[in-house]
Image (cartoon, rainbow, N blue to C red):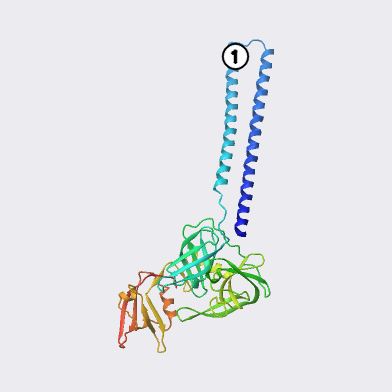
Protein backbone atom coordinates (compact mmCIF):
# COMPACT_ATOMS: atom_id res chain seq x y z
CA UNK A 1 0.00 0.00 0.00
CA UNK A 2 2.88 2.35 0.89
CA UNK A 3 4.51 1.67 -2.50
CA UNK A 4 1.28 2.57 -4.30
CA UNK A 5 0.97 5.84 -2.33
CA UNK A 6 4.60 6.76 -3.12
CA UNK A 7 4.14 6.03 -6.85
CA UNK A 8 0.93 8.11 -6.92
CA UNK A 9 2.65 11.02 -5.14
CA UNK A 10 5.58 10.96 -7.59
CA UNK A 11 3.19 10.86 -10.57
CA UNK A 12 1.21 13.83 -9.16
CA UNK A 13 4.39 15.85 -8.60
CA UNK A 14 5.55 15.21 -12.18
CA UNK A 15 2.14 16.23 -13.54
CA UNK A 16 2.16 19.49 -11.51
CA UNK A 17 5.65 20.42 -12.77
CA UNK A 18 4.61 19.76 -16.38
CA UNK A 19 1.50 21.95 -16.10
CA UNK A 20 3.50 24.77 -14.47
CA UNK A 21 5.92 24.62 -17.41
CA UNK A 22 3.02 24.79 -19.87
CA UNK A 23 1.54 27.83 -18.11
CA UNK A 24 4.93 29.58 -18.09
CA UNK A 25 5.35 29.06 -21.84
CA UNK A 26 1.80 30.28 -22.49
CA UNK A 27 2.34 33.41 -20.38
CA UNK A 28 5.56 34.24 -22.23
CA UNK A 29 3.92 33.88 -25.63
CA UNK A 30 0.92 36.02 -24.57
CA UNK A 31 3.31 38.75 -23.35
CA UNK A 32 5.12 38.71 -26.70
CA UNK A 33 1.78 38.90 -28.52
CA UNK A 34 0.65 42.02 -26.63
CA UNK A 35 4.09 43.64 -27.02
CA UNK A 36 3.86 43.16 -30.79
CA UNK A 37 0.39 44.69 -30.92
CA UNK A 38 1.53 47.77 -28.95
CA UNK A 39 4.41 48.19 -31.36
CA UNK A 40 2.02 48.00 -34.33
CA UNK A 41 -0.25 50.64 -32.76
CA UNK A 42 2.69 53.02 -32.11
CA UNK A 43 3.92 52.71 -35.68
CA UNK A 44 0.42 53.50 -37.03
CA UNK A 45 0.06 56.72 -35.00
CA UNK A 46 3.54 57.86 -35.98
CA UNK A 47 2.76 57.51 -39.67
CA UNK A 48 -0.51 59.48 -39.22
CA UNK A 49 1.36 62.42 -37.61
CA UNK A 50 3.96 62.52 -40.32
CA UNK A 51 1.29 62.50 -43.05
CA UNK A 52 -0.44 65.54 -41.50
CA UNK A 53 2.76 67.65 -41.65
CA UNK A 54 3.78 66.70 -45.18
CA UNK A 55 2.52 68.42 -48.37
CA UNK A 56 0.10 66.63 -50.60
CA UNK A 57 1.66 63.64 -52.26
CA UNK A 58 1.48 62.89 -55.89
CA UNK A 59 -0.75 60.09 -57.03
CA UNK A 60 2.21 57.85 -57.67
CA UNK A 61 3.72 58.48 -54.22
CA UNK A 62 0.33 57.85 -52.58
CA UNK A 63 0.03 54.52 -54.33
CA UNK A 64 3.56 53.55 -53.25
CA UNK A 65 2.92 54.59 -49.62
CA UNK A 66 -0.32 52.60 -49.55
CA UNK A 67 1.44 49.56 -50.92
CA UNK A 68 4.19 49.75 -48.30
CA UNK A 69 1.65 50.17 -45.50
CA UNK A 70 -0.30 47.16 -46.74
CA UNK A 71 2.85 45.06 -46.86
CA UNK A 72 3.84 46.01 -43.31
CA UNK A 73 0.34 45.36 -42.01
CA UNK A 74 0.30 41.94 -43.73
CA UNK A 75 3.71 41.07 -42.26
CA UNK A 76 2.59 42.11 -38.79
CA UNK A 77 -0.55 40.03 -39.07
CA UNK A 78 1.50 37.04 -40.17
CA UNK A 79 3.69 37.46 -37.08
CA UNK A 80 0.58 37.58 -34.92
CA UNK A 81 -0.64 34.34 -36.49
CA UNK A 82 2.81 32.75 -36.01
CA UNK A 83 2.84 33.64 -32.30
CA UNK A 84 -0.74 32.49 -31.88
CA UNK A 85 0.04 29.22 -33.65
CA UNK A 86 3.11 28.69 -31.49
CA UNK A 87 1.02 29.30 -28.39
CA UNK A 88 -1.61 26.76 -29.45
CA UNK A 89 1.06 24.21 -30.43
CA UNK A 90 2.88 24.58 -27.10
CA UNK A 91 -0.30 24.12 -25.09
CA UNK A 92 -1.39 21.14 -27.21
CA UNK A 93 2.03 19.48 -26.89
CA UNK A 94 2.03 20.01 -23.14
CA UNK A 95 -1.46 18.57 -22.75
CA UNK A 96 -0.53 15.55 -24.88
CA UNK A 97 2.64 14.99 -22.84
CA UNK A 98 0.74 15.22 -19.57
CA UNK A 99 -1.91 12.80 -20.78
CA UNK A 100 0.51 10.22 -22.21
CA UNK A 101 2.85 10.17 -19.20
CA UNK A 102 2.28 6.88 -17.37
CA UNK A 103 3.60 6.09 -13.87
CA UNK A 104 5.81 3.03 -13.44
CA UNK A 105 4.03 -0.18 -12.46
CA UNK A 106 5.08 -2.13 -9.37
CA UNK A 107 8.24 -1.97 -7.27
CA UNK A 108 10.70 -3.81 -9.52
CA UNK A 109 10.14 -7.11 -7.69
CA UNK A 110 7.63 -9.58 -9.16
CA UNK A 111 6.03 -12.90 -8.32
CA UNK A 112 6.66 -15.82 -10.67
CA UNK A 113 4.14 -18.65 -11.01
CA UNK A 114 4.82 -21.77 -13.05
CA UNK A 115 2.85 -24.79 -14.21
CA UNK A 116 4.81 -28.02 -14.36
CA UNK A 117 2.69 -29.77 -16.96
CA UNK A 118 4.82 -32.90 -17.28
CA UNK A 119 4.88 -33.43 -13.50
CA UNK A 120 1.29 -32.34 -12.97
CA UNK A 121 2.25 -29.66 -10.45
CA UNK A 122 2.94 -25.97 -9.93
CA UNK A 123 5.64 -23.82 -8.33
CA UNK A 124 6.29 -20.24 -7.31
CA UNK A 125 9.24 -17.92 -6.95
CA UNK A 126 10.37 -14.33 -7.24
CA UNK A 127 11.95 -12.20 -9.96
CA UNK A 128 13.52 -8.79 -10.51
CA UNK A 129 12.57 -6.50 -13.39
CA UNK A 130 15.54 -5.48 -15.54
CA UNK A 131 13.74 -3.44 -18.20
CA UNK A 132 10.44 -1.57 -18.26
CA UNK A 133 9.40 -3.68 -21.26
CA UNK A 134 9.40 -6.89 -19.23
CA UNK A 135 12.82 -8.57 -19.00
CA UNK A 136 12.94 -10.36 -15.63
CA UNK A 137 15.89 -11.91 -13.79
CA UNK A 138 15.37 -15.00 -11.63
CA UNK A 139 16.94 -18.33 -10.66
CA UNK A 140 16.97 -21.14 -13.18
CA UNK A 141 15.54 -23.57 -10.63
CA UNK A 142 12.46 -21.30 -10.31
CA UNK A 143 11.43 -21.99 -13.93
CA UNK A 144 12.99 -25.41 -14.44
CA UNK A 145 10.51 -27.86 -15.98
CA UNK A 146 7.88 -25.14 -16.43
CA UNK A 147 5.43 -25.57 -19.29
CA UNK A 148 3.80 -22.23 -18.48
CA UNK A 149 5.31 -19.18 -16.77
CA UNK A 150 3.42 -16.14 -15.49
CA UNK A 151 4.81 -12.89 -14.10
CA UNK A 152 2.57 -11.17 -11.55
CA UNK A 153 2.97 -7.58 -10.32
CA UNK A 154 2.02 -7.76 -6.62
CA UNK A 155 -0.67 -5.36 -5.47
CA UNK A 156 -1.96 -4.80 -9.02
CA UNK A 157 -4.08 -6.64 -11.59
CA UNK A 158 -1.14 -6.93 -14.00
CA UNK A 159 -0.37 -10.55 -14.94
CA UNK A 160 1.80 -11.45 -17.95
CA UNK A 161 2.57 -14.71 -19.70
CA UNK A 162 6.33 -15.02 -19.97
CA UNK A 163 8.73 -16.98 -22.13
CA UNK A 164 12.17 -18.15 -21.06
CA UNK A 165 14.82 -16.21 -22.99
CA UNK A 166 17.65 -18.39 -21.69
CA UNK A 167 19.33 -19.82 -18.63
CA UNK A 168 22.60 -20.94 -17.05
CA UNK A 169 22.32 -24.27 -15.23
CA UNK A 170 25.65 -24.04 -13.41
CA UNK A 171 25.17 -20.48 -12.14
CA UNK A 172 21.42 -20.92 -11.55
CA UNK A 173 20.45 -17.78 -13.50
CA UNK A 174 17.56 -17.31 -15.95
CA UNK A 175 16.01 -14.44 -17.89
CA UNK A 176 12.30 -14.20 -18.74
CA UNK A 177 10.42 -11.84 -21.04
CA UNK A 178 6.89 -10.87 -20.02
CA UNK A 179 4.71 -10.61 -23.13
CA UNK A 180 3.01 -7.23 -23.61
CA UNK A 181 4.58 -5.61 -20.57
CA UNK A 182 5.39 -1.89 -20.51
CA UNK A 183 6.10 0.87 -17.99
CA UNK A 184 7.31 -1.62 -15.38
CA UNK A 185 9.32 -0.32 -12.46
CA UNK A 186 12.90 -1.65 -12.63
CA UNK A 187 15.31 -2.56 -9.85
CA UNK A 188 18.17 -0.32 -8.77
CA UNK A 189 21.44 -2.24 -8.40
CA UNK A 190 24.74 -1.67 -6.63
CA UNK A 191 26.97 -4.15 -8.46
CA UNK A 192 30.16 -2.16 -7.87
CA UNK A 193 29.67 -1.65 -4.12
CA UNK A 194 32.22 -3.43 -1.93
CA UNK A 195 30.50 -5.77 0.52
CA UNK A 196 31.68 -6.56 4.02
CA UNK A 197 30.91 -9.09 6.71
CA UNK A 198 28.50 -7.64 9.26
CA UNK A 199 26.76 -5.41 6.73
CA UNK A 200 22.98 -5.20 7.31
CA UNK A 201 20.83 -6.61 4.50
CA UNK A 202 17.19 -7.28 3.70
CA UNK A 203 15.83 -10.11 1.52
CA UNK A 204 12.51 -9.58 -0.28
CA UNK A 205 10.48 -12.32 -1.90
CA UNK A 206 7.31 -14.31 -2.46
CA UNK A 207 7.74 -16.17 0.83
CA UNK A 208 5.90 -19.51 0.86
CA UNK A 209 4.31 -18.65 -2.50
CA UNK A 210 1.57 -16.46 -1.00
CA UNK A 211 1.77 -13.92 -3.82
CA UNK A 212 2.74 -11.14 -1.39
CA UNK A 213 6.22 -9.67 -1.03
CA UNK A 214 7.65 -10.10 2.48
CA UNK A 215 11.01 -9.09 3.95
CA UNK A 216 13.58 -10.95 6.03
CA UNK A 217 16.28 -8.88 7.73
CA UNK A 218 19.76 -10.03 8.62
CA UNK A 219 23.42 -9.37 7.95
CA UNK A 220 26.24 -10.72 5.80
CA UNK A 221 28.13 -13.48 7.60
CA UNK A 222 30.37 -14.63 4.75
CA UNK A 223 31.60 -13.79 1.24
CA UNK A 224 32.81 -15.91 -1.70
CA UNK A 225 31.08 -19.00 -0.31
CA UNK A 226 30.59 -22.27 -2.21
CA UNK A 227 27.78 -24.77 -1.65
CA UNK A 228 26.42 -27.92 -3.28
CA UNK A 229 22.67 -28.12 -3.91
CA UNK A 230 20.61 -31.10 -5.03
CA UNK A 231 18.45 -30.91 -8.15
CA UNK A 232 15.19 -32.63 -9.08
CA UNK A 233 16.92 -35.08 -11.41
CA UNK A 234 18.88 -36.69 -8.59
CA UNK A 235 22.07 -34.83 -9.41
CA UNK A 236 23.72 -31.90 -7.75
CA UNK A 237 25.23 -28.57 -8.67
CA UNK A 238 28.03 -26.56 -7.09
CA UNK A 239 27.39 -22.83 -6.71
CA UNK A 240 30.40 -20.60 -6.05
CA UNK A 241 31.18 -16.98 -5.14
CA UNK A 242 28.02 -16.59 -3.05
CA UNK A 243 27.05 -14.07 -0.38
CA UNK A 244 26.14 -15.82 2.89
CA UNK A 245 23.63 -14.15 5.23
CA UNK A 246 21.58 -15.02 8.30
CA UNK A 247 18.35 -13.64 6.79
CA UNK A 248 15.78 -16.43 7.19
CA UNK A 249 14.54 -17.20 3.69
CA UNK A 250 11.43 -19.18 2.83
CA UNK A 251 10.51 -21.36 -0.16
CA UNK A 252 9.34 -18.94 -2.86
CA UNK A 253 12.00 -16.32 -2.10
CA UNK A 254 14.27 -17.70 -4.84
CA UNK A 255 15.10 -15.08 -7.44
CA UNK A 256 14.27 -12.16 -5.16
CA UNK A 257 16.59 -9.27 -4.28
CA UNK A 258 19.04 -9.06 -1.43
CA UNK A 259 19.04 -5.35 -0.58
CA UNK A 260 21.52 -3.05 1.13
CA UNK A 261 20.36 -0.53 3.73
CA UNK A 262 20.22 2.01 0.87
CA UNK A 263 17.63 -0.14 -0.90
CA UNK A 264 20.01 -1.18 -3.70
CA UNK A 265 20.12 -4.77 -4.99
CA UNK A 266 23.42 -6.43 -4.10
CA UNK A 267 22.44 -10.06 -4.71
CA UNK A 268 19.83 -12.55 -5.90
CA UNK A 269 18.52 -14.90 -3.19
CA UNK A 270 19.17 -18.46 -4.29
CA UNK A 271 19.64 -21.14 -1.64
CA UNK A 272 19.63 -21.98 2.05
CA UNK A 273 21.80 -24.32 4.07
CA UNK A 274 19.24 -27.14 4.08
CA UNK A 275 18.71 -27.06 0.30
CA UNK A 276 17.22 -24.80 -2.31
CA UNK A 277 15.43 -22.20 -0.20
CA UNK A 278 14.01 -24.07 2.74
CA UNK A 279 13.65 -22.13 6.00
CA UNK A 280 17.12 -21.85 7.51
CA UNK A 281 19.37 -19.49 9.40
CA UNK A 282 22.10 -19.53 6.73
CA UNK A 283 21.05 -18.30 3.30
CA UNK A 284 22.94 -17.62 0.10
CA UNK A 285 22.67 -15.08 -2.71
CA UNK A 286 24.39 -14.74 -6.08
CA UNK A 287 26.20 -11.36 -6.28
CA UNK A 288 24.11 -9.14 -8.54
CA UNK A 289 27.10 -8.24 -10.71
CA UNK A 290 27.64 -11.91 -11.56
CA UNK A 291 23.94 -12.49 -12.20
CA UNK A 292 23.72 -9.44 -14.50
CA UNK A 293 26.77 -10.58 -16.48
CA UNK A 294 25.05 -13.89 -17.23
CA UNK A 295 21.77 -12.08 -17.98
CA UNK A 296 23.46 -9.79 -20.53
CA UNK A 297 24.99 -12.82 -22.24
CA UNK A 298 21.57 -14.45 -22.47
CA UNK A 299 19.83 -11.33 -23.77
CA UNK A 300 22.61 -10.85 -26.36
CA UNK A 301 21.98 -14.41 -27.57
CA UNK A 302 25.44 -15.84 -26.82
CA UNK A 303 25.06 -19.58 -26.18
CA UNK A 304 27.97 -21.46 -24.60
CA UNK A 305 28.54 -24.81 -22.92
CA UNK A 306 27.11 -23.19 -19.76
CA UNK A 307 24.50 -20.80 -21.14
CA UNK A 308 21.48 -21.96 -23.13
CA UNK A 309 19.57 -19.42 -25.22
CA UNK A 310 16.19 -20.04 -26.85
CA UNK A 311 13.88 -23.04 -26.80
CA UNK A 312 15.02 -26.28 -25.17
CA UNK A 313 15.46 -29.57 -27.02
CA UNK A 314 13.21 -32.28 -25.56
CA UNK A 315 13.80 -36.03 -25.49
CA UNK A 316 10.74 -36.92 -23.44
CA UNK A 317 12.06 -39.35 -20.85
CA UNK A 318 12.74 -39.52 -17.12
CA UNK A 319 15.99 -41.21 -16.17
CA UNK A 320 17.75 -42.45 -13.05
CA UNK A 321 21.37 -43.35 -12.40
CA UNK A 322 22.31 -46.97 -11.79
CA UNK A 323 25.40 -48.49 -10.29
CA UNK A 324 26.45 -50.47 -13.36
CA UNK A 325 26.67 -47.44 -15.67
CA UNK A 326 24.12 -45.92 -17.97
CA UNK A 327 20.77 -44.36 -17.16
CA UNK A 328 17.60 -46.33 -16.50
CA UNK A 329 14.54 -44.98 -18.28
CA UNK A 330 12.07 -44.50 -15.42
CA UNK A 331 9.29 -43.06 -17.55
CA UNK A 332 8.45 -42.00 -21.08
CA UNK A 333 6.30 -38.97 -21.93
CA UNK A 334 3.25 -40.16 -23.89
CA UNK A 335 3.43 -38.92 -27.46
CA UNK A 336 6.97 -37.59 -26.94
CA UNK A 337 10.01 -38.05 -29.18
CA UNK A 338 11.45 -41.00 -27.19
CA UNK A 339 8.18 -42.94 -27.28
CA UNK A 340 7.88 -42.31 -31.02
CA UNK A 341 11.37 -43.82 -31.47
CA UNK A 342 10.44 -46.98 -29.52
CA UNK A 343 12.09 -46.30 -26.14
CA UNK A 344 10.22 -47.53 -23.08
CA UNK A 345 10.52 -47.77 -19.31
CA UNK A 346 13.18 -50.25 -18.24
CA UNK A 347 15.56 -49.53 -21.11
CA UNK A 348 19.07 -48.43 -20.10
CA UNK A 349 20.56 -45.59 -22.12
CA UNK A 350 24.31 -45.95 -22.54
CA UNK A 351 25.18 -43.30 -25.12
CA UNK A 352 23.94 -40.40 -27.24
CA UNK A 353 25.57 -39.74 -30.60
CA UNK A 354 28.42 -42.01 -29.48
CA UNK A 355 29.04 -40.09 -26.23
CA UNK A 356 28.78 -42.19 -23.07
CA UNK A 357 26.20 -41.00 -20.54
CA UNK A 358 26.57 -41.96 -16.89
CA UNK A 359 24.60 -39.30 -15.01
CA UNK A 360 21.37 -37.36 -15.65
CA UNK A 361 23.47 -34.19 -15.77
CA UNK A 362 25.67 -35.52 -18.59
CA UNK A 363 22.58 -36.34 -20.67
CA UNK A 364 20.99 -32.95 -20.00
CA UNK A 365 24.20 -31.07 -20.77
CA UNK A 366 24.51 -32.77 -24.15
CA UNK A 367 20.88 -32.14 -25.07
CA UNK A 368 21.28 -28.43 -24.24
CA UNK A 369 23.78 -28.14 -27.09
CA UNK A 370 21.06 -29.21 -29.54
CA UNK A 371 18.06 -27.44 -31.04
CA UNK A 372 14.51 -28.77 -31.38
CA UNK A 373 14.19 -30.68 -34.65
CA UNK A 374 17.71 -32.13 -34.43
CA UNK A 375 18.03 -35.92 -34.80
CA UNK A 376 20.22 -37.78 -32.30
CA UNK A 377 21.17 -41.45 -32.01
CA UNK A 378 20.45 -43.13 -28.68
CA UNK A 379 22.38 -46.25 -27.70
CA UNK A 380 20.60 -48.43 -25.15
CA UNK A 381 19.99 -51.94 -23.89
CA UNK A 382 16.49 -53.32 -23.57
CA UNK A 383 15.18 -55.15 -20.46
CA UNK A 384 16.40 -58.45 -21.93
CA UNK A 385 19.96 -57.14 -22.26
CA UNK A 386 19.96 -56.69 -26.03
CA UNK A 387 21.95 -53.77 -27.42
CA UNK A 388 19.94 -51.38 -29.61
CA UNK A 389 20.06 -47.93 -31.20
CA UNK A 390 17.26 -45.50 -31.98
CA UNK A 391 17.16 -42.30 -34.01
CA UNK A 392 15.18 -39.64 -32.13
CA UNK A 393 14.05 -36.29 -33.52
CA UNK A 394 14.12 -33.89 -30.58
CA UNK A 395 11.03 -31.88 -29.75
CA UNK A 396 10.60 -28.56 -27.96
CA UNK A 397 10.23 -28.82 -24.19
CA UNK A 398 10.47 -26.99 -20.86
CA UNK A 399 13.67 -25.38 -19.58
CA UNK A 400 16.12 -27.63 -17.77
Instruction: Name which quarter of the figure residue 354 lies in.
Output: bottom left
| Camera sees residue 177 | yes
Tag 1 secondary structure: helix
Image quarter of the C terminus: bottom left
Residue drawn at x 58%, y 13% is 60
Q: Nearer the viewer, residue 53 or 276?
A: 276
Residue 229 position, x and y percent, is 52, 79
Q: Is residue 115 above or below residue 59?
A: below
Q: Is residue 330 above or below residue 335?
A: below
Q: Nearer the viewer, residue 151 or 369?
A: 151
| Camera sees residue 296 | no
Residue drawn at x 40%, y 73% is 118
Image quarter of the N terminus: bottom right
Residue drawn at x 47%, y 57% is 180
**Residue under pointer 1:** 62
Instruction: Name which quarter of the figure residue 189 lies in.
Output: bottom right
Horizontal side, residue 375 vs residue 220: left or right = left
Residue 70 position, x and y percent, is 58, 21
Label 1: few (<14), some or many (≥20) within 10 Å? few
Amino acid sequence: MLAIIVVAAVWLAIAVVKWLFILAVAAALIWLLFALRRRMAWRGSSRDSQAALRPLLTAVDAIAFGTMTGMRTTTARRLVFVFAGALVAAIAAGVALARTSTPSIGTGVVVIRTNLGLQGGAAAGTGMVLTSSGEVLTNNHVIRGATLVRVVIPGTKHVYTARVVGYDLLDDVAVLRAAGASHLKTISTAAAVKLRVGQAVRAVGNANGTGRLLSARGSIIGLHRSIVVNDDAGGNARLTGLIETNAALQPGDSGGPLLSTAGKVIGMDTAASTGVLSTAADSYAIPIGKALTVARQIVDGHSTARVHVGTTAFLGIQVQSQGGGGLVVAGVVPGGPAEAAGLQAGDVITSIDGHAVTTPRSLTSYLLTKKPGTTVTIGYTDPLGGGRTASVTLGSGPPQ
